[in-house]
Image (cartoon, helix red, strand yellow):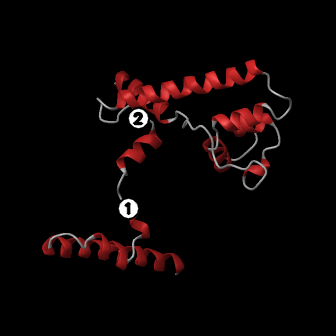
Amino acid sequence: MRNIHGYNALLDKIDSVRDISYGGHVSWTKAPYHILQKQDHYINPHKYFGPDQVKLILDAHSLRADLYWAGIDHNLTFCEKLNIMLKWFGFLTSYGGLIMLGIPTFGVFWPKKFRHSMLTLGIANLENIDEETSKEMTMNLGPELQKTLQAVLLEIIEDKHKKMKDKVV
């Protein structure tokens, strides 16, 4: 039983690995990021903000953002920039290592967001499908399979509309 607990702890740790990105489309002066006023807000958002805002801020972390917030108080020296880049490269290497370990283990060691992206690759967002889209998706299939898929997609659409009506009422 103890092994299972350790295994779950390891998987939780892997799932909590931060996503690695070089840069983003985040404007720190515009909503919702304008609430960050100092570097500590960026580094430790859980001390200052609610869980939704913390998730938003942590998702916006990137190499460019790290450099921006480190240089907000003073001009960064070459050594400070190099240190930030080496930390980012270390995160990148460990993230890449998890992805490589996930290949022979069928994704067990992939971080949660990466695993979700891989498992949903090529699958349309079913909540945004309408009747016309469902017809387009099934046009080039055999007649029997086409009818079956259209029936399933129409059932999904009807279920979606029913849920929307239930929310309104």
Front position among marks 2 and 1: 1
Residue 32 lies in quadrant = bottom right
- Badge 2 marks a residue whose secondary structure is loop
32 left or right, relative to 142: right
Q: Which residue lies furthest to the right in this view?
A: 74
User: Which of the pair 79/16 is nearer the observer?
Assistant: 79
Q: Residue furthest top?
A: 79
Q: Which amino acid does label 1 sit on?
A: Ala
Category of crowding for the residue at label 2, using alpha-carbon neighbours closer than 10 angstroms: few (below 14), some (14–19), many (at least 20) = many
84 relative to 23, above or below: above
Where is residue 38? Give x, y as percent.
Answer: 82, 38
Q: Mark 2 points at which residue?
A: 110
77 relative to 117, above or below: above
Where is residue 148? Give x, y as percent.
Answer: 19, 72
Mark-to-mark CA distance, 2 and 1? 22 Å
- Badge 1 marks a residue whose secondary structure is loop
User: Which of the pair 64/91 is nearer the observer?
Assistant: 64
Q: What residue type is labelled 2?
A: Trp
Residue at the image position 76 percent from the left and 41 percent from the top: 48
Where is residue 40? Give x, y as percent.
Answer: 78, 34
Residue at the image position 70 percent from the left and 33 percent from the top: 66
The numbered dot on residue 161 is: none
147 relative to 33, above or below: below
Q: Mark 1 points at which residue?
A: 124
Residue 111 lies in quadrant = top left
